[in-house]
Structures are given as structure tokens and as C-alpha cells.
Image (cartoon, rainbow, N blue to C red):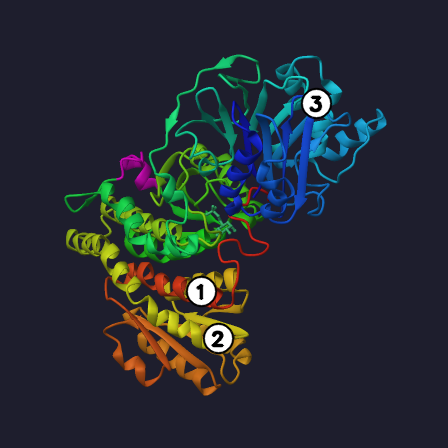
Amino acid sequence: MCGIVGYIGYEQAAPLLLKGLEKLEYRGYDSAGIAVYDGSGLEIYKSKGRLKILSDMIEGGAKVKGTVGIGHTRWATHGEPSDINSHPQVSDSGRFAVVHNGIIENYMSLKEYLINHGVEFVSETDTEVIAQLFEYYYDGDMLDTMLKVLAKVEGSYAIGVISQEHPDELLAVRKDSPLIVGIGEGENFIASDIPAILSHTRDIYRLEDNEIVALKADSITVYNMEKEVVSKTPFHVDWDVSSAEKGGYEHFMFKEIMEQPEAIRKTISPRLKNGKIVLDDVSLSKEDLEKISKIVVLACGSAYHVGMNAKYILEKIARIPVEVDLASEFRYRDPIIDESVLVLVISQSGETADTLAALREAKRLGARVISIVNVVGSSIANDSDDVLYTWAGPEIAVATTKAYSTQLAVVYLLALYLGEKRNTITTEQLERYVKGLENLPNQIQEILEHQETIQYLASQYFNSRDIFFIGRNLDYSMSLEGSLKLKEISYIHSEAYAAGELKHGTISLIEDGTLVVSLATQDMLFDKMMSNVKEVKARGAVVLGLTTEKHKEIEKTADHVFYIPSTEDILLPSLAVVPLQLFAYYVASMKGCDIDKPRNLAKSVTVE
Ligand code: G6P
């Protein structure tokens, strides 16, 4: 989704803004732009396409002089990607420049009003309305003007504004869109996310909804909507710059795949004490636990696939009925929710608009909300009753890997926690699962060490037109994730099917040579899966089987096999996902795709 960077200080702003925007590329964008005050007026440079085009246009920033500026990467919502629709958007007179992430829902009526008052618009964006409103309401004071503008706009926004009337000031505000403030010495920053400013400062403020920040080179003042000064506590970022960068790997996605053992270790170890699950972050009382009538999981994309796994895992371990909903569908189906329902929200970014809206709807209906989130202090984390953070670190590649794995690890912790509290598992079972959980990072490491086997398989099939994934039960959820990963980054058409459902339609798509990745990790369903594998083989499919070391007999049926180590059945998805990620990665790499930034996709989708 859109990225914002702003700077005020003593350094040349343009190169710094470009570098910051580069760090936000992972959010997905289709155009970029900057505005810098050059001593007499605002210099604006914008371009459709990759940042490189903008950077070349202004010689890496050298062409633009000035020490205050704002920059933006845009992911089009209102108006096609174009130079003119890119941000910053500028007011009629050129005195105000605005960058914006989010949507101004009432922009049409505001635009009409302004046009009737003689204002000329040049873009199709909702953002231009903000810039024009600044001009319209400007009364000599930036903060007062901002308050007047905010009183008119409805929707979600993170906004940064500079003006040639007040070149020593940069104003920003947020509501339902992320924005942080970087604290420097003689310089200060705003950004949509930490990596954009991490090479300059590690001390940040996280702006809350409806907080306005006024930055000068040597001061930061945060106001609420009543114009009262708000006192904020800074947050110190302790992860290093390299963890937000590629660290020697060709792609963020590969680096993040390799980081999974460590990410899972970090996520589970603080929550395992003497063989017990300790979830200090969950404040459910004994009565709360007893009254849970069902769990509803809400998420989008890969996080939704974690939710599908969660259904099998929570029902098996905690014996509570679980429904899983795509967040974008949940709100509009008149869901049956009351105080007895525990809602589990899963989101890497914590900012996905559909997920956030579904969460709010669930809360409005009385549910208690626990979220599994990777970004500390994000909107979903803030709005939840309890948050179980995944300690995956920043995930930059659009296609999620380590966030997915840590979300799954948290699902196990939660299931075992509930199972233990509700006496639905024995002490002996708990011990076995905990041991299995602790062993997952080593087993994943083992799989990663066999990456060349997957690389070889990818080399055989990267030219495929269609690739199918089939499995039953947890292997079905994994098929969905394997298929999504592949199509997201390699653009190969792929379907995931519950293996038993194939014969009800999809099998007609199998032709001579079609690759069918067949997941058969679950002991209980192995034989059933083999029947389904035979069905596709009989129609000409080539089968890549994925199973555990104990099922060597798969070699009689499958053309290729990748073995994963054995563990408890419910833990197998954590292992199975790794070869699927690597397969998608290598296929995309062999096809020469833009792996970290697949076309049309965004990392953090902050519009519904
Ligand atoms: C986007 C990303 C997916 C992600 C989904 C949910 O579509 O491309 O990788 O799974 O959003 O994101 P969240 O941040 O809520 O987990």
C-alpha cells in the first residue's frame, strides 16, 4: 500500500526521501513522487512506475535542493496510476503539497463544493481534495488549517503536508492508516514504517488515531483534535538495519524463508516455561474460558490459510467449534456473534483494512478479540482485547513466509493453552506437543538444508502452464497456501483442491503432463490420499508427493517425492509449508519474476 516519508532538518531532503521510499517499496506501489521546499517555493517531481524512474529524473535527488520535504509511493485507488495522479498533490496556487495514504470517502462532495467555489482540480485523486482544502481554509496557521480540513474529511488517512508559507514546519496526522515519527537531533522524520528511517534514528513515536504532529528541525509537538498537546513515550527500535534489508540474499523472500527457524524460536520460547504454555499476553479468566461457545477466525490471504489450519488444530486440541471467515466476507453476512464468541484475528501487518473492519464489527457485536499480529502497535493490535505478537521481525517480501510460520506457531500455543485450561488434552499429550513444538526450528533447518532438491524439481516444472495442489484435512489448508504462494510470485495458474473433492469437477482439468503436488503428510489419511493420487495419475498427471519419511511407499505411486521429518500430525503444516515456499520461490526465480514485488499485489492492503 502507499508509503510516506517526510523530512525536516539540515541534510538535503531529496536523496534522503528517495532512500526512505526505497525501503517502503515492499508495500507495493505503482508511482512515486516528492515535494521539497527549495528556498523560494515547492519543487514537485512525480512519476508513474518504479522509483528508479523518479530517481533518474532528479539525478538521485542531486537536482533538488532543500532540507524539508515529503515523499510518497502510491498504490492507485482513485484514478489510474499516472504522473498526474501520483502524490504529492498540490493546491491550486502551488503553496501546499500533500502526501496521503488511505481513502477520503466523501471526496466527491468536497470536490464539488470546492469546484463551485472556483477551485480547479487537475487529478482524479481523493488526495487532491486535501491539498485544495488546505488552500481554501488557510488562515496563516498550519495547525488551525489542518484542524479545519480534518473537520471536513471522512475516511482513513495518514497525511503529510508542507507549505511554502511555513517552510520550517512539516505537519502530519493519522486515522486508520499507519504513521510513525522519527526523532532525530536537529532533524525529524515521518514515515509509514520503520525501515524508511532506520538508518537515521531508532527512536520513534507511534502516532495514534486523530493525533497531529508538528515537526520542526529541532522540535516535535503532538496535538489532539482539541489542539491540546499530547505527551508521547518514545519507542526504541532494537532490531538492526540489516534485518530490514536483504542481508546478502538475492531476494527478501528467500532471506525470510531462511529466517523461519529463528523467527519461530523467538515466537515460542518466551511462551514455553517448564513444559507449560505461558501466555501472559492473554487475559482470559477461567470464567471467560468456560463461556466460549465458538471461535471465529478472521483474516485475509495467507493469514486466512493459517486460520484454516487453526480450525483443524483448535477443534482437535481445545474441542471448541471453529468457524473461519475471510474478513472481507464476514461483515456482510450478518454473522451470529455475541459475548460468548472468541474472535481470533490474524494479520501480519496489523493494518489490513478488511481485517480491521471485520474486527471492529465483531467487537461491536460483543465478541472478545484476540489477535495474532506481527507489527507492534498496529491498528489491529490496538483494537484487540489481547494481542499475541509473532516475533518474526519485519517482513518485506510481499509474499509472506516467516509471518505465516510464526502465526501458525502461535496458533499451536493458543490451542495447547486452551486445551490445557479446558482439560481437553492430557498432561502427557501436552508434553508431547510441547516437545514437538520446540523441535520445529531444527526440523525446518533440516528441510532448508535440502533446498537444492526443491530447486531441481522447480527446474523441471517452471515452464508449466497449470499446477495443482491437493491434500486432505491440514494438507488441504497447506495446498491452498502452496498454490497461493506459487501463483502470487510466478504467475503460473494454480488450483488447490481438497483431494476428495477432485472427482466432483476439477479432475476434468488434469491433462497429460499436468503437475499435481500431492500433500500426504497426515498418517490417518495417507491411504485415502494415495487413492486420489492414483486418480490423477490415471488421467496423465505427473505427481510430486510431499510426505513424511515414514511413508516411503509413496514412491510406488508418485513421480517425485520430497520427504519432511516426522512429528505430531498437527505440527506437520509448519514443516510442509517450507518446501512449498521454496518451490514457489525457485519457480518464480527461474521464470525471472520480480519475486519481492509481484505485479498487482501489495504487502499491506489498507483499503477495503
Ligand atoms: C496481502 C498480502 C498477503 C497477506 C494479506 C493479509 O494480500 O499480499 O501476503 O497474506 O494481505 O495481510 P496481513 O498483513 O493482514 O497478514
Q: Residue at x 29, y 50 (%)?
A: 264
Q: Residue at x 46, y 82 (%)?
A: 541
**Residue carrying label 3:** 134
Q: Is 83 placed above or below 443 here?
A: above
Which one is earlier in the sequence, the residue at label 3 or at label 1? 3
**What is the secondary structure assignment of the residue under circle 3?**
helix
Three-letter residue code for mark 2: Leu
Nearer the observer, 301 or 456: 456
Instruction: Report the mark closest to the observer, 1 or 2.
Output: 1
CA gap, disc 3 to disc 2? 58 Å
CA gap, disc 3 to disc 1? 47 Å
Nearer the observer, 451 or 544: 451
Q: Residue at x 39, y 21 (%)?
A: 233
**Residue carrying label 1:** 584
Q: Which stretch is magenta?
A: 279-291
CA gap, disc 1 to disc 2? 22 Å
Which image quadrant for residue 279? Answer: top left
Side (left or right) of 390 relative to 152: left
3 and 1 marks in contact (CB < 8 Å): no
Which one is earlier in the sequence, the residue at label 1 or at label 2? 2
Three-letter residue code for mark 1: Ala
**What is the secondary structure assignment of the residue under circle 2?**
helix
* x then y, percent, for residue 371: 40, 41
* x then y, percent, for residue 140: 69, 12
The crowd level at tag 2 (other Cα within 10 Å; few <14, some 14-19, many 20+) is some
* x then y, percent, for residue 267: 29, 45
**Residue carrying label 2:** 502
Q: Quadrant of the N terminus?
A: top right
Three-letter residue code for mark 3: Phe
Nearer the observer, 522 or 438: 438
The answer to if 284 sits in the magenta stretch is yes
